[in-house]
Each structure stands twice: as C-alpha cells, then as structure tokens.
Image: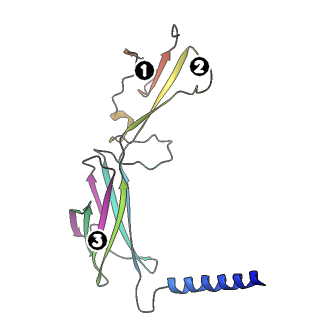
Amino acid sequence: MILGKHIVRGGLVALALIFFAQPVAGQSSIQAFVTWKADSFVPADAAIKAIPTKGSQISAGVEALEAGRPIDLSKTEIRWYVNDRFLKSGIGMATITFPAEQLASRYDLRAVLKQVRGADISKTVQIPMTSPIVVIDGPYAYKIAPAELRLTARPYFFGVKTIDNFLVTWKVNGGTLPVVSDNPLVANLSLAGVV
C-alpha cells in the first residue's frame, strides 16, 4: 500500500515538472547554442574531438532556437568575446575564427545576440586547451619483441592540419632511426646487440 502511494506521488511530481518546463502562454523561450572546432591535428582514426593548442585556429558558430525552430540571425548584431575580452561583432556574424594565441587551461567563448525578440541572449562555452602530445605505438607491450621493432608516432593536438606539415626525426640513444616508408611517423628500431 505504501509503495502504491509513492508511485502515485512520483507520478504527480513528474507531471508537475513537465507542466512547469513548458513556456508560459504568450512568452517565448529562446535558446542559443555555440559550437566550436579546432584545426589541431589528430590521427584520422582517432574518435576524439581535436582540442586546440597554442597556434591552433578555432572556428565557432552560434545558432538560436525559439520553440524548437531556428531563428534567422542574418539581421541580428552578434558580439563575440574570449575570456571576457571583446573579439569582434557584426550584423549576422554567426561564425567566427580566431587563433589560440596562448596556452591556457581553457578559453571561455561567449556570443551575445543583441535584441532578439526584444532581449539580449548570451551563451558561453568553455573550450579546453592542451599541449601537443605524441604517443609512440609499439605493438609489443607485454610480449617478447622481435629483433626489429616497427614504431609508429601518433601525434595529437598539434597546430597543423595534415601530416605533411610535420618534420619528424626519430632518435634513440643519440642515433637517428631510418624512416621505413613515405610516412615519417613510422620507423624501425633494431634491437640487435641491445642487452
């Protein structure tokens, strides 16, 4: 019997939340969304978002919805700020590109839509920053390695767009390793004579 009361009470609470989540009649509910991407390099098979680092270009865009439908921002003044510093503004400027000039822990990117249906709409997103890293992939972890290892460098979050923009030199114990293909991110390491 008590269990039944909790179920009924829980059902009423859920109904009340749904009711109060709806906009009041005659009042619009406008939401703004800011998305971003960075041109930092990540391997093509990496299922991660490219995080900006110093020197990366960051592209962002803003959209607004009213009652689930897109609002035309082509005649709206849009102001952009990074870490509360004014960046740029313009009529219909729904996209922007800017450089990550310094390595910080993050950038706070804010878009302000001026006078949308009589009110300013502001949306801020946090863009994480990172330092470039290289992961050396040697497929012999926890196994006995052959006399010659094929190593692959997997760079992440460098401020370049393609592998062609990398200058790679492999060095082990002061010696330079030969590159084994047209891909400078792959090298062979001979273990002959290594104890």
User: Which residue lies at the image location 37% right of the left edge and 39% below the top edge?
Assistant: 132
Between discs 2 and 3, the one toward the N terminus:
3
* Mark nearer the N terminus (2 vs 1): 2
User: In this figure, which residue is indicated by the disc labeled 1?
Assistant: 179
Residue 124, percent from left and from top? 34, 66
Disc 3 crowd, CA 10 A, few/some/many (<14, 14-19, 20+)? many
User: Which residue position is annotated with label 3?
Assistant: 112
Q: Residue at x 52, y 13 (%)?
A: 191
Secondary structure of the magenta portion, mostly? strand
Residue 109: quadrant of the picture? bottom left
Instruction: Say which mark, if any, is on residue 113.
Output: none
**Picture layout, residue 135 above or below residue 126:** above
Inspect the image, locate mark 2, and give the three-letter code of the amino acid beneath it.
Answer: Ala
Real-space Cα distance between discs 2 and 3? 57 Å
| Alpha carbon distance from label 3 to label 1 | 50 Å
* Residue topped by disc 2: 145
Disc 2: CA contacts within 10 A as few (<14), some (14-19) or many (>=20): few
Which element is circle 1 on? Answer: loop
**Identity, as a three-letter code, of the amino acid under mark 3:** Val
